[in-house]
Amino acid sequence: MILIRFPNIESKRSALAKLAGRFSFKSWPSGEMLVPEDALAYLAIQGVSFIAEGPASYEQNGSAFRGLAPAAV
């Protein structure tokens, strides 16, 4: 998972609309978003401006998956 930022609120809203239903992601009110690596290319192709901050920290990455239901055995 990669941490990204947006230069403005319009870019973040556009990214949210384009990612919903296609990729898992975590968004914070601070403007940061945690996305899978594949989503970076998708956002770039869609013309969404963003700044890649780099790999997410353990704490940030863990919070993206904390609410998922366990897999059936």
Image (cartoon, helix red, strand yellow):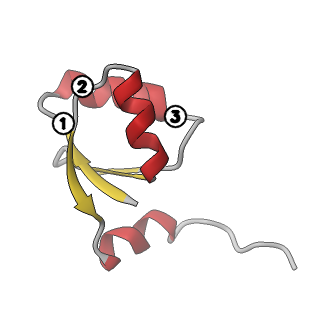
**Marks 1 and 3: in contact by CB < 8 Å?**
no
Residue 6 bears which disc, if any? 1
The residue that label 3 is drawn on is 20
Up-down relation of residue 51 to residue 61 (above or below): above
Which percent across, then down, holds residue 13?
Answer: 31, 26
Instruction: Name the residue rendered at 67%, 68% in the picture.
Output: 69
Residue 37 bears which disc, if any? none
Q: CA distance from mark 3 to mark 2?
A: 14 Å
Which of the two residues, 7 or 47, is positioned nearer the viewer here?
47
The residue that label 2 is drawn on is 11
Residue count near mark 3 (Cα–Cα under 10 Å), binned few <14, some 14–19, many ≥20: few
Type of amino acid at the residue the image marks with label 2: Ser
Instruction: Name the residue rendered at 32%, 69% in the picture.
Output: 60
Q: Quadrant of the N terminus?
A: bottom left
Which percent across, then down, holds residue 16?
Answer: 39, 32
Type of amino acid at the residue the image marks with label 3: Ala
Q: Secondary structure at mark 2?
A: helix
Q: In the rendered view, does 58 fall on the left or right side of 53?
A: right
Which percent across, then down, holds residue 57?
Answer: 28, 73
Which of the two residues, 37 or 71, is positioned nearer the viewer here?
37
Residue count near mark 2 (Cα–Cα under 10 Å), binned few <14, some 14–19, many ≥20: some
Up-down relation of residue 24 to residue 67 (above or below): above
Residue count near mark 1 (Cα–Cα under 10 Å), binned few <14, some 14–19, many ≥20: some
Q: Secondary structure at mark 1?
A: loop
Of pointers 2 and 1, the one earlier in the residue sequence: 1
The quadrant in which residue 17 appears is top left
Q: Quadrant of the C terminus?
A: bottom right
**Marks 1 and 2: in contact by CB < 8 Å?**
yes
Q: CA distance from mark 3 to mark 1?
A: 17 Å
